[in-house]
């Protein structure tokens, strides 16, 4: 059933994003497919306009993917290792590299059944593929990990004391991660068992603000314009605890006494 809202809250573990819209936003609204109104002829674009639209789409796709990665990362604090997997050979084929990476995942899962991951393939300046990998693994010597990888060296970054790991990981992703070589291909991979960010709108979004953010100051805020939704007031918060245990929506938390 179609309905409107002007407040949205996205909860990714301890990280919370609040979107306040100046106008009402429709949810589950379906256009009338039987509308017989004559459609306008599509505008013919010149080469410059086509290039500009392509660049705008690339920027939008980059930002959307980074947002997905950031939220997925913050919603899964059990991912305790962040590393970069490299190839000794100059492998420039993403298809070949992805096959090798998937075989690596199978070997890890065989030894560590609880292994979970989020991986982003990227091209180095020399054209070779490498992978940024955030994963859940017990302690193991880097030599053992490189033996299982079997393709080159592995660099491990310490993330124990980082609060917003999602933002930290996204800093490693270059602006060139979406070039023609990645067109039509997956931009990142992850275990199906990972928890997703929780989105609240309307009543539950209001209740969340009242219960959890009433006395908390945002760590970041800005106002921006969207072509589709108009003016948006955005605020980001970093809590000291996870509001939803196990990363699952539970409406009973709104009715519990603090």
Image (spheres, rainbow, N blue to C red):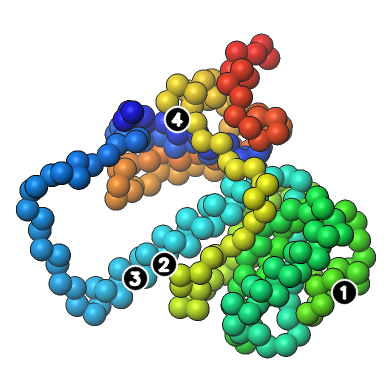
Give the residue furthest to the left. 38
User: Which marked residue is nearer to the observer: mark 4 or mark 1?
Assistant: 1
**Residue ID for mark 1:** 147
Task: Assess whether mark 4 and mark 3 are in contact (beta carbons under 8 angstroms).
Answer: no
**Secondary structure category for the residue under label 2:** helix
* x, y percent for residue 214: 56, 23
**Residue ID for mark 4:** 201
Badge 4 or badge 2: first in the primary sequence: 2
* x, y percent for residue 161: 79, 49
Left or right, 117 with reference to 114: left
Image vertical order of residue 50 relative to residue 134, above or below: below
* x, y percent for residue 91: 66, 85
Image vertical order of residue 9 relative to residue 168, above or below: above
Image vertical order of residue 244 relative to residue 59, above or below: above
**Residue ID for mark 3:** 54
Badge 1 or badge 3: first in the primary sequence: 3
Work out whether residue 189 can be spotted: yes
Quadrant of residue 253 in the image?
top right
The residue shown at (35%, 35%) is 27
**Residue ID for mark 2:** 58
Q: How many marks?
A: 4
Task: Assess whether mark 3 and mark 2 are in contact (beta carbons under 8 angstroms).
Answer: yes
**Secondary structure category for the residue under label 1:** helix
* x, y percent for residue 118: 67, 57
Q: CA distance from mark 1 to mark 3?
A: 42 Å
The residue shown at (49%, 23%) is 204
């Amino acid at each position: 059933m179609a309905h409107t809202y002007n407040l949205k809250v996205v909860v990714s573990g301890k990280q919370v994003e609040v979107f306040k819209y100046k106008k009402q936003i429709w949810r589950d609204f379906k256009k009338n497919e039987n509308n017989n109104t004559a459609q306008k002829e599509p505008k013919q674009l010149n080469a410059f306009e086509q290039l500009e639209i392509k660049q705008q789409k690339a920027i939008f796709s980059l930002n959307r993917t980074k947002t997905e990665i950031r939220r997925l990362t913050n919603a899964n604090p059990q991912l305790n290792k962040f590393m970069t997997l490299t190839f000794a050979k100059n492998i420039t084929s993403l298809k070949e590299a992805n096959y090798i990476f998937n075989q690596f995942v199978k070997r890890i899962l065989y030894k560590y059944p609880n292994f979970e991951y989020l991986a982003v393939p990227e091209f180095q300046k020399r054209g070779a593929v490498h992978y940024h990998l955030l994963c859940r693994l017990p302690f193991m010597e880097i030599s053992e990990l490189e033996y299982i990888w079997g393709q080159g060296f592995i660099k491990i970054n310490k993330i124990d004391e980082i609060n917003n790991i999602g933002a930290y990981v996204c800093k490693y992703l270059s602006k060139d991660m979406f070039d023609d070589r990645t067109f039509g291909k997956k931009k990142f991979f992850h275990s199906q068992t990972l928890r997703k960010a929780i989105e609240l709108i309307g009543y539950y979004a209001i209740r969340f603000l009242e219960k959890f953010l009433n006395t908390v100051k945002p760590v970041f805020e800005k106002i921006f314009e969207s072509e589709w939704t108009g003016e948006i007031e955005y605020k980001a918060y970093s809590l000291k605890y996870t509001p939803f245990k196990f990363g699952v929506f539970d409406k009973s938390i709104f009715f519990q006494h603090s």
